[in-house]
Amino acid sequence: MTLWLPNFVIAGAPRCSTSAAFSYFVAHPQVVGSSVKEVQYFMDRTSALFHPEANSQDFGLERYSRFFEDGMKRKPNAIIRMEATPGYLFQTEALMKLPDLETSPRFLFLVRRPSQQLYSSYLYSRNQAANLPLDVSFEEFAFGSPRMDKARNEFHRYALDYVRYVNFLEKWRARCPDDRMRVLVFEQFSDNLSENMSSLSTWLGIDPGFYENFVFRRENANIQVRSAAVHRAARLVRQLLPASVRGAAKGLYARANSSSFDPSADRPLDVMAAIDQAVASDSERLAASFDLDLSDWFLPVKQRRPEMATT
């Protein structure tokens, strides 16, 4: 039996344009994407994102291969097979198994200013995911509290730890040769998508010219939910619907109970400044270790900065 395993993985970090990057890559005629963007197959058993029905610890690589079968049927001559699970950056299971796949996958990591990443994660958890109580403030989410210590989701229990990117990236570098690993800064990636996608294409051995006239659309932007109770109920109902009607149902629901996030809304600048200060030494290490220009991360956060083209 042929095992279709990825030779390219977008492995982090959450809310750093991984959904957008995945969609841009799979549009390329030489790239096959997994049947779902976030396969989450190599999550630690203790993670809130661990899937009992599909994981590397219980089912090996054969079940993982199934996520790429349909794509290979559509593009049998594809050069790149890929998935994008941003939580892999933090998982021991992914760290210990993915680099050793026989396909010798390459890994892309996107990192974002810590305060911006946490604020985006906070909004996502409150709205799209609906897994964070509405009375949890951004400060409590970022810096923790006794009740946050009891949260089932590890990304809620230790939110600040997950923007100390260098602590995780150095472990990945110890497992991957430099030519199989790229670390990009979200803000710089988003500011020049065509150039960055062309550069990554060259690195992966696919035609970079595809992105010269490519239309880069926004993906997975934050939304505002009108009723949290309705949103939670809708998420449960959606799981019971046939896959063939989920897309249409999602569109109808979005129009009824959500609206676009207002980028001009006031943000908690004092909390955001405290976050950047708390992890400043980690960001400095990140810049030095991976030769990144993070100078913008140390400037004051602007009150009404327009939302990035991708999130």
Image: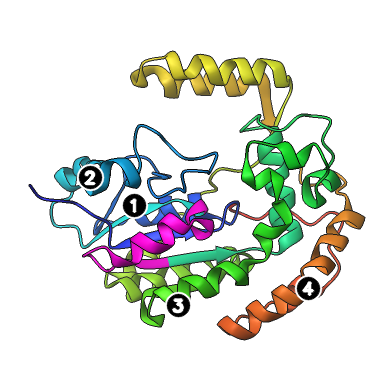
Q: Is residue 221 visible?
A: yes
N-terminal-most mark, 4 or 3: 3
**Residue 26 circle label:** 1
N-terminal-most mark, 3 or 2: 2
The magenta segment is 87-107
Q: Which residue is mark 4?
A: 280
The picture places residue 149, in percent across and down from the top left corner, at 75, 42
For marks 2 and 1, give the CA distance.
Answer: 10 Å
| 258 horizontally vs 30: left or right | right
- SS for callout 4: helix
- Say which residue appears at 64% left-offset and 36% top-offset: 152
N-terminal-most mark, 4 or 2: 2
The picture places residue 167, in percent across and down from the top left corner, at 61, 70
Can you say whether 27 is above or below 223 in the image? below
Nearer to us of marks 3 and 2 is 3
Asked if residue 254 is among those painted magenta in the image, a careful observer would answer no
- The kind of residue on which mark 3 rests is Ala
